[in-house]
Amino acid sequence: MISGKPVDTQGVLPYPKNIPCKDLMDYVSVFRDEYLTPEDLVDFANALNTFQELVGRDQCWCVKEANHPLLKSFTATHPYRPQFKGRDARVLSLALVDQFHSEEKPVIVRSHACRSFHCIHPGHMFYGTKADVQLEIQRRRGLKVSLKIINEIRLKREADPESWTYSSLSAYYKLPLQTIGRICRREIYDF
Ligand SMILES: [Zn+2]
């Protein structure tokens, strides 16, 4: 079992450099709370290193496509969650870059740049809100409208639907009619 002493992972972890002592304890406690051993932590960090070396920093680190002895503890059987020894690998990966679950940011958001549900690249995800999830989905689809504009469109439409028809909003904001419709009907960013 795990002792109270932090694991010496120096020279193993790819991220982050120069971790303050407090944060080192934090990610250690995430692994400990998942009933993973210090050896598991080192294996996990080694796996991230392996991905970085083999696949590169700019690509997805997809455990489904990976085929390396160091990655044998990862599975991709869950439809949208990479797993490490049955645990959510995203939680572990984020802990290693000093990101943790909080009440304000309770969900793991996959960045629009990420191409795989089974990616464990810590740079491809972050803790956020359901609104962030929707935003990243829309960004992935190529929609580049800020939340501020979306709220503005809805407020105009709700305050004066006769003046602010879909076509007048479309002309004003230079957005496709279809997009305006989806924003007003709350098919985009439903929060
Ligand atoms: Zn990715």
Image (cartoon, rainbow, N blue to C red):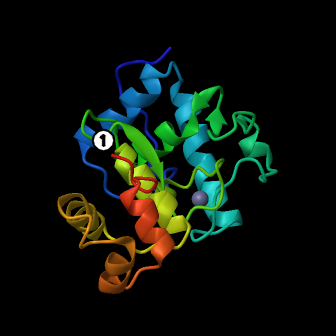
The residue at label 1 has a CB less than 8 Å from ligand 1: no
Categorize mark 1 by other alpha carbons within 10 Å: few (<14), some (14-19), many (20+): some
- Residue at the spot 17% in from the left edge and 60% down from the top edge: 159
**Towards the viewer: 177 or 30:** 177
Mark 1: amino acid: Lys
Horizontal and vertical percent position of residue 73: 71, 34
- Residue at the spot 49% in from the left edge and 54% down from the top edge: 122
The answer, for residue 111, to whether it is visible in the render is: no
Q: From what the image shows, is residue 118 above or below residue 17?
A: above
Horizontal and vertical percent position of residue 94: 44, 45
**Towards the viewer: 126 or 161:** 161
Q: From what the image shows, is residue 9 above or below residue 113?
A: above
Dividing the image into four equal quarters, which quarter contains ligand 1? bottom right
| Count of numbered marks | 1
- Judged left or right of residue 69, residue 112 is left
Horizontal and vertical percent position of residue 13: 49, 51
The answer, for residue 146, to whether it is visible in the render is: yes
Q: From what the image shows, is residue 96 above or below residue 26?
A: below
Residue with the mark numbered 1: 105
Kindly state the secondary structure of the residue where label 1 is placed.
loop
- Judged left or right of residue 144, residue 162 is left
- Residue at the spot 25% in from the left edge and 48% down from the top edge: 20
On the image, which quarter does residue 23 sit in?
top left
On the image, which quarter does residue 85 sit in?
top right
Q: Residue furthest top?
A: 1
- Judged left or right of residue 52, residue 169 is left
Q: From what the image shows, is residue 47 above or below residue 106?
A: below
